[in-house]
């Protein structure tokens, strides 16, 4: 069974609370998501492999440690994943980026794919799939199903907010994919929204409502 990593750092929790407020403006919501994504990147990359590199300090030569950002791929589930992607890229600017376009069929709540673009040589790369909300889990599961066709070295899933139903669905479908989240809320409602949640993340990031 996969592990759910609850990112309970006080800064993460504080910013998440500010984002939940219904009167937070688009500008504020987007800025907070960006900051939160940077903090989450810190946790998600905690076990990234390091390699030895020779470095010349002003005094002598030494062997330091460096990560190979190019081996890391952030895969954004469109469109709301973009909100997390930007923050993560500012922490790991060398990372590659993939996009998966999925929308939720409003009647069935199942994920329908309309776009898929990944970097080359995915079998050599570690993947972090990003999407702010783990609600039904359908989009994340479908995205990871597709990614597994490319046999990446590893896959993690990072979101802002989950719910017990989404976590359970993900763990059943992909027991090898760890979940990183700032909170697991109470429940999913019949329209596929997380309660208490923060509303429609895409609409709040892009100001489309
Ligand atoms: N997607 C959202 O944006 N919000 C939810 O609460 C659930 C899914």
Image (cartoon, grey):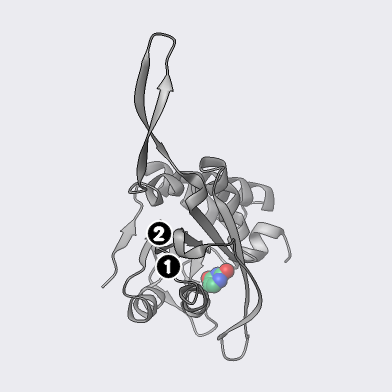
Residue 181's disc is 2
Q: Position of residue 110 (x, y in %)?
A: 55, 86
The spot of residue 160 in percent (x, y) is 47, 59
Tag 2 secondary structure: strand
Disc ID at residue 144: none
Residue that numbered label 1 is attached to: 162
User: Mark 2 touching mark 1, by CB under 8 A?
Assistant: yes
Total residue callouts: 2
15 above or below 169? above
Closer to us: 158 or 73: 73
Asked if ligand 1 lies within 8 A of label 1, the reply is: no
**Residue 112 at x, y percent in the picture:** 62, 83
Which of the 4 image quarters holds residue 63?
top left
Specify whether 47 is left or right of 132. Answer: left
State the residue at coordinates (48%, 52%).
71
Task: Examine the rendering and report whether any part of residue 28 can be seen.
Answer: yes
- Residue lying farthest to the left in this orientation: 1
First of labels 2, 1 by sequence position: 1
Residue 12 relative to residue 143: left or right: left
Which residue is outermost to the right? Answer: 208
């Amino acid at each position: 069974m996969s592990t759910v990593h609850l990112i309970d750092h006080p800064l993460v929790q504080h910013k998440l609370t500010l984002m939940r407020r219904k009167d937070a403006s688009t500008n504020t919501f987007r800025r907070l998501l960006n900051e939160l994504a940077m903090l989450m990147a810190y946790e998600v990359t905690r076990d990234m492999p390091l390699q030895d590199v020779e470095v010349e300090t002003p005094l002598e030569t030494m062997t330091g440690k460096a990560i190979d950002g190019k081996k890391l791929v952030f895969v954004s589930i469109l469109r709301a994943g973009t909100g997390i992607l930007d923050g993560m890229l500012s922490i790991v600017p060398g990372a590659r980026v993939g996009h998966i376009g999925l929308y939720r069929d409003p009647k069935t709540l199942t994920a329908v794919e309309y776009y898929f673009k990944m970097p080359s040589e995915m079998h050599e790369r570690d993947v972090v799939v990003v999407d702010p909300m783990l609600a039904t889990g359908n989009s994340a599961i479908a995205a990871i199903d597709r990614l597994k066709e490319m046999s990446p070295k590893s896959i993690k899933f990072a979101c802002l907010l989950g719910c017990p139903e989404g976590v359970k669905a993900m763990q059943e479908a992909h027991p090898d994919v760890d979940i990183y989240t700032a909170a697991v809320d109470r429940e999913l409602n019949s329209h596929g929204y997380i309660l208490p949640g923060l509303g429609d993340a895409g609409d709040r990031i892009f100001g489309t409502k």
